[in-house]
Image: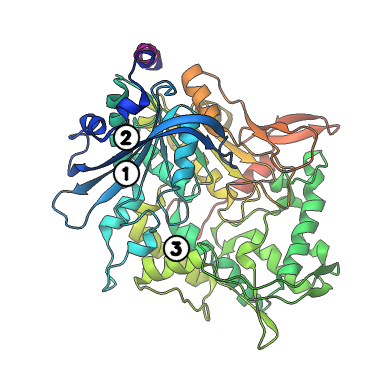
Amino acid sequence: MHSKKTLGLAATAALRVTASSLANVCTTSYIQSALPLDAVSGITLDSNSITANAVYNYTSEAGDLWIGGKGLDFCNVTLAYTRNGLSNSTTNLWYWLPSPEQWQGRYLTTGGGGFSITSGEAGLANGIVYGSVAGTTDGGFGSWSNELSDVILAANGTMDFDMLYNFGYRSIHEMSVIGKEVSKNFYNASSLYSYYQGCSEGGREGWSQVQRYGSQFDGAAIGAPAFRQAFQQVAHLAAAVVEQTHDYYPPPCELEKINNDTIAACDKLDGREDGVVARTDLCKLHYNANASIGQPYSCAAVAATSGYTKRQMAQAAEPAANGTVSAKAAAVANDLWKGLFDSKGRQIYVSYQPGADFEDAETTYNSATGQYEATVSGIGVQWVNYFLKEIISTELSIKNVTYDTLRSWILEGMQKYDSVMQTTWPDLEDFHNAGGKVIHFHGESDNSIPTASSVIYHDAVRKIMYPNMGLNESYSALQDWYRLFLVPGAAHCSPSTDQPNGPFPQNVLQSVIDWVENGVVPERLNATVLDGTTSDVDQKICTFPLRPMWKDNATMDCVFDKASYDSWVPELDSIPVPVY
């Protein structure tokens, strides 16, 4: 597959040398001539909607998930299409096309975060650094700033399934098909390499494409995917229900102390002392929050924050906090680490690993009563209200909500959105047969999406794709094209401020490109300490299920530990169907 493509790209490289200047091709008329009018059935591209302007000497600043670049020239293009037979169905597309001299024969699809389908300019800028056309879509939401929660319900409270399907998988697919064809026509190329990059919701969107449209991408860089939405969003509410069940609402400072103690105690479990919990599996097996009972904590007063974020409500001011860690706080922490169980003792879902901060469990100080109260997660509230109850409200009382209530909400979401929002189809035969490669990574101290969520899916793909192979043989076969990396100390799609010496894979897309185009297998994933003080800034991450273990604080081996492996793949026996 790729040998023929390489020859095609070599030929197009010769075309680029003699191509017209960016100024000549970055025009409305030229883009109109490049439109693939019949690329996607059921839609009509509006050639009159096209805007095009040339940008020169652009600087793309580096971020946690991408490298920066300077001196970038590109054509900034927007266009729109409508869905046939539907009024008010305009979807806007946005592409950055590198100058003919800077294009490297690549196309990149980017995703969003939270309930947003786009990461806007940040994702596009990342693409042109790699000599790639980059594309994003507004999903038909009516504005680049609108999220799914802004459009999912009509004024009368009925579900807008077109918006749901657009967000679930359809708009990203249409944008990718159109973008690739526009790219070929723009550069007069017969072929190109097609990639995907995204994290969190962007990661779920990536899997929505890999699972449904196997031959669409040559490679994908997918981080901390927010798939399994029926579980993921309800799980954001679990911490508040744990606190309610224990009838104890710890000051944030008390949980912060437990987390700091956890990091300090579990730091050395990988054989190296660097302030990073690289073996959260061993920490979960061998550490207990009771170790913090009686330990003093102290925090300064915190000013109030306003607004409504994707994850949390606004926070009230907090007074200075002093005290010692209580047995009740330790019990709350231990239950949060354990995961969600029903009243029959069966496991419903996984939780965050020890070492991840307790953001979902962060309480709010009530100045009138002088007490701390549970705070429900904003995005969890949106899911229950907008998607399950189908009401437009940002208020949700958890009074009388139990673990069994959370389970019922999860099952309701599974039944209602299995084909759209779960995004855990484990049979990737089409993608594999087309020669695709995927690097899937997840921070071990992710405080928004449980790290084990990615392990569960990775394990499901292994079992479905290689049902007749043993553990070692099936992992070996899977790793020929799909590798999972758990990032020591990393938070959600970024390094952790609590563990700054943790390495982070800032340049995953380059590793995917090297694998696809040059056959360089990422036996260990390149990562960089972006914010810490460790002397070895450039580090490597083990391919799961192998885990890091250091010798003499100097040499890292990637080892297999059956007990720790088992801790990543729970039975989830409270759910009556397989959880992929």
Residue 178: quarter of image:
top left
In terms of depth relative to the viewer, which is nearer, 422 or 183? Answer: 183
Task: Say which residue appears at 49% left-offset and 57% top-offset.
Answer: 232
Q: Is residue 468 visible?
A: no
Residue 4 forms part of the magenta stretch: yes
Are circles 2 and 1 on residues that touch, CB within 8 Å? yes
Give the residue pinned by disc 2. Answer: 179
Q: Is residue 562 left or right of residue 169?
A: right
Q: Which residues are magenta?
A: 3-15
Tag 1 residue: 93
Q: Secondary structure at mark 1?
A: strand
- 537 lies above or below 296: above
Whole-number angstrom distance, CA of label 2 to CA of label 1: 9 Å
Spatial CA span between label 2 and label 3: 36 Å
For label 3, the crowd category at 10 Å Cα-Cα, with few meaning under 14, some 14 to 19 and many 20 or more, is: many
State the image coordinates of residue 429 (x, y, percent, origin top left).
38, 31
Asked if the magenta segment contains residue 384, the reply would be: no
Q: Amino acid at mark 2?
A: Gly
Residue beneath the point at 31% across and 40% down? 175
